[in-house]
Amino acid sequence: MSDDQAGGPALHPLLLRQLRKAGLTQSLPEEVERLVRLVDGAYREQDLERRRNTRATNLMAEEMTALAERIRVQAGQDPLTGAANRTLFLRRLGEAVEGLGEGGHLAVLLLDLDGFKLVNDSLGHGFGDRMLCEVCERLRNVAPADATLARHGGDEFTLLLPSVGRSSEAADVATRAIAALEQPFTIDGNEVLISASAGIALYPGDAPDMGALLVAADTAMYQAKDRGRGQYVFFSAAMNVRLHQRLLMKSRLSKALERGDFHLVYQPKTCMRTMGICGAEALLRWHDARLGDIPPGQFIPVLEEMGLIGEVGLWVVGQACRQMRNWRDQGLAPGRMAVNVSARQLRRPGLAGEVADIVRRAGISSADLEFEITESTIIQDTDLAIPLLNELRAMGIHIALDDFGTGFSSLGYLRRFPFDTIKIDKAFVDEIMVRPDDVAIIRAIIAMGHALDRRIVAEGVETAAQFKLLKELAVDEIQGYFVGRPMTADSLTLLLPRSS
Ligand SMILES: [Mg+2]
């Protein structure tokens, strides 16, 4: 009997092995052959049965895991850290509010890690998860016995202090918590330093109900972050005014584009070799009929938060391109036009195509355009940023690394990313006048940049002394009050050279 029995399909491998063992490999009488086929069928059915069972077992295991997860959640436990989850926290808060005696106070402390996203992005989620567990452990150690510690998701933790005699008791807990998290974390031989910001809100003084109390603690926490992180802040009624202003800003911003309330100003860049204007950076400004002129540092983060930055960013590119065309039509040579692009804008699907369309419609060349991108933008989304930057660059658009010297200033980035230009931040330029060490650093950056064939622009140049030093350091271009403040298109028109 052979593997490939004439007239029938190959026999089940197990059956075939047994037939071989029994020496039944020659051709068999017809009735034996029929019997063998019957047994073969039984073997196959068993295979099928086994597969079915395995599948059922796997399904059951999955269901059990999901069930266990659901039970944990219902029991009020955060699956990662074992701390209370949001639901349990709210239940305990409700009980504490109800049980509060006449004249009693309770406090909610909301704590958020500073820069945790960077830990996750650079060391991986596995590392981040273990770190969160240790954060939880440290917080448990400093919390009073009657406190409830909860993880609200992400890197946000809350502590309910169900009875605080004075607000200083809550402050003591916050101080201990922040100090505990400032100790280095060592996981797998990696040492990481982190800080935390906390907001504290008191009931019933700061808010009439539980929801408002959490919002108040959250508002105070953001205030702590604003003030420089690694500290705690008590909620105050004045913060509500700021919150209200922010809400108002949001509602006004949502209509600003269609109302035509945005405009651009242009800050020139000067070429050190020719001392002529070689380009400008387009900067977004917002004038609102009710709120007046709001500084970009205030409204741009809100545009980002509202998810409007992509749309407004494209408007900026379009407006800048049309202005460029306008100057060209007047026989002027505006050089290269730079626009600032944020991480969120880079995440917009189809960005490169939209930009190509705008450039074409404006009748300029993509090579006339430069995108300024900050280092932190790239860190936030490296996997997405590199291919997109390459795509934009393939279209001819120049890419500049903006605000260099403020973030990580990693020299590695200069090599890995497709930049044409490096813009040295104003903070760094300010420093070089007073700190000789910084001159050495800037000299090294420029030497490395030039070796990689990048242009170096110094931002925020304000004095003749800075100008002189930067010229000695062989910076290619400068930008700052020394050569021109951000100005209207009409003002810049007067300064632009005629095209030859
Ligand atoms: Mg810029």
Image (cartoon, helix red, strand yellow):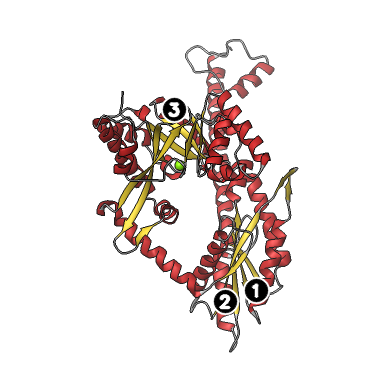
Kindly tell me whether mark 2's CB lies below 8 Å from ligand 1.
no
Q: Is residue 366 left or right of residue 456?
A: left
Question: Which residue corresponds to mark 2?
Answer: 202
Spatial CA span between label 1 and label 2: 9 Å
Q: Is residue 350 left or right of residue 47?
A: left
| Label located before the other in sequence (1 or 3) | 1
| Label located before the other in sequence (1 or 2) | 1
The quadrant of the picture occupied by the C terminus is top left
Q: Position of residue 5 (x, y in %)?
A: 53, 13
The residue located at (47%, 42%) in the rendering is: 482
Quarter-of-image position of residue 73: bottom right
Foreground: 468 or 105? 468
Question: Which residue corresponds to mark 3?
Answer: 274
Question: Which residue corresponds to mark 1?
Answer: 170
Relative to residue 25, is residue 341 depicted above or below? below
Secondary structure of the residue carrying tag 1 is helix
